[in-house]
Amino acid sequence: MDKYENLFTFRDDLVLCNGCKWVVKKPSNHRTSLLRYHLKTRHKETMKTVDAITETNKKRKREAVKANTSIPNKDVTLKKPKLEQNPKIQDALTIWNAQGL
């Protein structure tokens, strides 16, 4: 309900719209769909602003996650081993049997 704190006043078990003094009992499940519906039907311009701010915040969070996860770790080498470094199947089985595993 954080994004609605400037638009509504929350008191005990009531919610009061700061724009038109509409009053409703606070939903017991703490959902904001009733508040969104009120803004959508009675305060269309305000709802557009809320949606724009929400979208901007989502975009900012996505970019932050992308920036934090796309930085490669310099300590990790991503080189593939050369083919001659990998033992052939027959050699690998010989090593395995010789060690008694």
Image: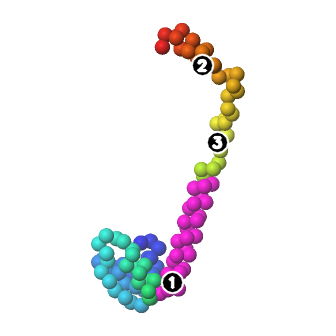
The residue depicted at 37 percent of the width and 88 percent of the height is: 22
Residue 46's tag is 1
Amino acid type at image mark 1: Thr
Would residue 5 be counted in the magenta stretch?
A: no
Image quadrant in which you'd find residue 25: bottom left
Q: What element does badge 2 sit on?
A: helix
CA gap between label 2 and label 3 equals 33 Å
Dot placed on the residue nearer the N-terminal end, 2 or 3: 3
Dot placed on the residue nearer the N-terminal end, 2 or 1: 1
Viewer-nearest residue: 36 or 101:
101
Amino acid type at image mark 2: Ile
Where does the image place residue 85, in percent across and percent down from the top left?
68, 22
Query: Residue beneath label 3, please?
Result: 73
Residue 89's tag is 2
Amino acid type at image mark 3: Asn
29 up-or-down from 6: above or below = above
Viewer-nearest residue: 99 or 55:
99
Residue 94 showing in the rendered view: yes
Q: Nearer the viewer, mark 2 or mark 3?
A: 2
Q: What element does badge 1 sit on?
A: helix
Which SS does the magenta portion mostly show? helix
The residue depicted at 58 percent of the width and 70 percent of the height is: 56
Q: Nearer the viewer, mark 2 or mark 1?
A: 2
Dot placed on the residue nearer the N-terminal end, 1 or 3: 1
Q: What element does badge 3 sit on?
A: loop
The boundaries of the magenta stretch are: 43-67
Where does the image place residue 67, in percent across and percent down from the top left?
63, 54
Would residue 57 be counted in the magenta stretch?
A: yes
CA gap between label 2 and label 1 equals 69 Å
Quarter the N terminus occupies: bottom left
